[in-house]
Amino acid sequence: METEIINGITTKLFETFGEDFTIYTENIEQNLKLPCFFVELVASSRKQIVGKRYKSENVFDIHFFTSEEEDKKEGRNVASILLEALEYIKLANGDLLRGTNMHFENVDDVLHFFVNYNVHLIQLDEKLKAWAN
């Protein structure tokens, strides 16, 4: 499920910002193509609600690195766009997920935009799991 959410986030980032912004999902320490986003799953938990029903809570940190020649206020502009753009993302199966607890902060000239995507799940029987794979 986490990979599907990351794909939904990266798709929305691409739709919103286009090809001018590189989007990374793996940590790259050197040779970043700026400006860029790095999408990171910070925390994920799953707790049982009733029977086979679970709630999965997923916290993401979307880093935004400005290009060297860009003004640092670009990060604030990007943050305000992200507040609206990431309110809803679409999964590959067409389901919409609503982002919650959205907030951002700047740390060492890098914008960190935090958003939660929480999902309710139903665990399949072992026989159905084997068949679905």
Image (tube, helix red, strand yellow):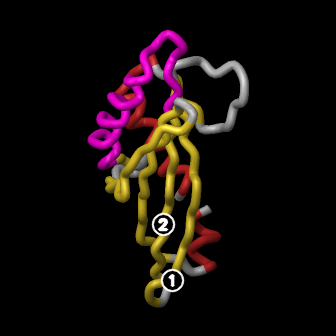
Give amino acid for label 1. Answer: Gln
Residue 108 is situated, as x and y percent measured from the top left of the image, at 57, 34
Compared with residue 125, is residue 102 higher up or lower down, i.e. above or below?
Answer: above
Give the x, y percent position of residue 27.
Answer: 68, 37
- Residue 82 inside the magenta-drawn segment: yes
Write down the residue under mark 1: 48
Q: Which residue is mark 2?
A: 57
Q: Is residue 129 magenta?
A: no
Query: Residue at 53% across / 33% down in the picture?
Result: 110
Q: Secondary structure at mark 2?
A: strand
Which image quadrant for residue 39? top right
Residue type (three-letter) at the residue carrying disc 2: Glu
Does residue 2 appear to the left or right of 89 in the view shown?
A: right
Residue found farthest to the left: 84
Kindly identify the residue that appears in the image at 48 percent across and 35 percent down. Answer: 111
Earlier along the polypeptide chain: callout 2 or callout 1?
A: 1
Location of residue 18 in the rendering, given as x and y in whole percent from the top left corner: 39, 21
Task: Name the spot of residue 106 as percent of width and height, x first.
Answer: 48, 38
Residue 121 badge? none
Q: Residue at x 35, y 47 (%)?
A: 89
Find the residue positioned furthest to the bottom.
51
Q: CA distance from mark 2 to mark 1?
A: 12 Å
Where is 65 relative to 123, above or below? above
The answer to whether residue 97 is seen in the rendering is: no
Would you place residue 115 above or below residue 125 in this image?
above
| Foreground label between 2 and 1 | 2
Graded by Cα atoms within 10 Å as few (under 14), some (14 to 19) or many (20 or more), the crowding at tag 1 reads: some
Q: Which residues are magenta?
A: 64-88
Q: Residue furthest right?
A: 30
